[in-house]
Image (spheres, helix red, strand yellow):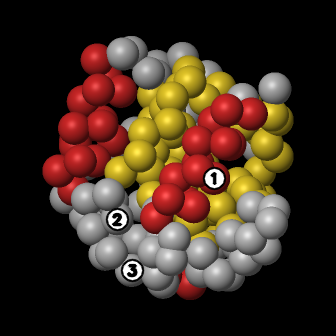
Amino acid sequence: MAGRQAAGASPGNSGCSEPGRHVAVVDLKKKHLAQMIAHARDEAPLEACGILAGKQDRVVEVYRARNADCSPLSYRLDPEEQYRIFLDIEDKGLDILGIYHSHPTSPAVPSNADLKQAYYPEATYFVVSLADPAEAQVRAFRIADGQVTEEEMVVV
Ligand SMILES: [Zn+2]
């Protein structure tokens, strides 16, 4: 993710989380999953990407963003859109909780390129796989220092 990072330098840092706290669970609603999957299907065969915002590890809003790469194999959040989304998140008093993107034909695991461009160690990276067209799969990961840890998703 290139470009402005001012608003997103510390995603999840709302002042009430202890430094270094590792949260392995993320809370989201069925509709948020459905929104990410719908976006992935709308953009296929290209990768889709976007941002999840919320409070205290609970997702409140899913923001679609443009994939500036326009590619079936990679994604890059459009920097201007990303900046606008960050401002909106700030306006609403929410935190940036995660970044999602889709894998139109490959499994829901981060690729090597995904690891390299994971600039937000506190964010949750959601990968939506459409490899099985009948049943989209979504998995969540924490990516820090090139290390990938799967997170538990609690869908309420
Ligand atoms: Zn990927």
The Cα atoms of the two marked residues, 2 and 1, are separated by: 15 Å
Circle 1 sits on which residue?
37
Mark 3 and mark 2 in contact? Answer it, CB < 8 Å.
yes
**Which amino acid type is shown beneath numbered disc 1?**
Ile
- The image quadrant that residue 17 belongs to is top right
Judging by the rendered image, the residue that carries numbered circle 3 is 71
SS state under label 3: loop
> What element does badge 2 sit on?
loop
Up-down relation of residue 69 to residue 3 (above or below)? below
State whether label 3 is within 8 Å of ligand 1.
no
- Give the amino acid type for the residue marked by disc 3 in the picture: Ser
Q: Nearer the viewer, residue 46 or 51?
A: 46
Of badges 2 and 1, nearer the viewer stands 1
Three-letter amino acid code of the residue under disc 2: Asn
Location of the C terminus (image quadrant):
top right
Which residue is under mark 2? 67
Q: Which mark is residue 27?
A: none
Q: Residue at x 72, y 77 (%)?
A: 131
Asked where in the image residue 108 lies, by quadrant, the reply is bottom right
- The answer for how far apart the CA atoms under marks 3 and 2 are is 8 Å
Compared to residue 2, the image places residue 50 above or below, namely: above
Does residue 137 sit above or below 151 in this rendering?
Answer: below
In contact (CB < 8 Å): disc 3 and disc 1: no
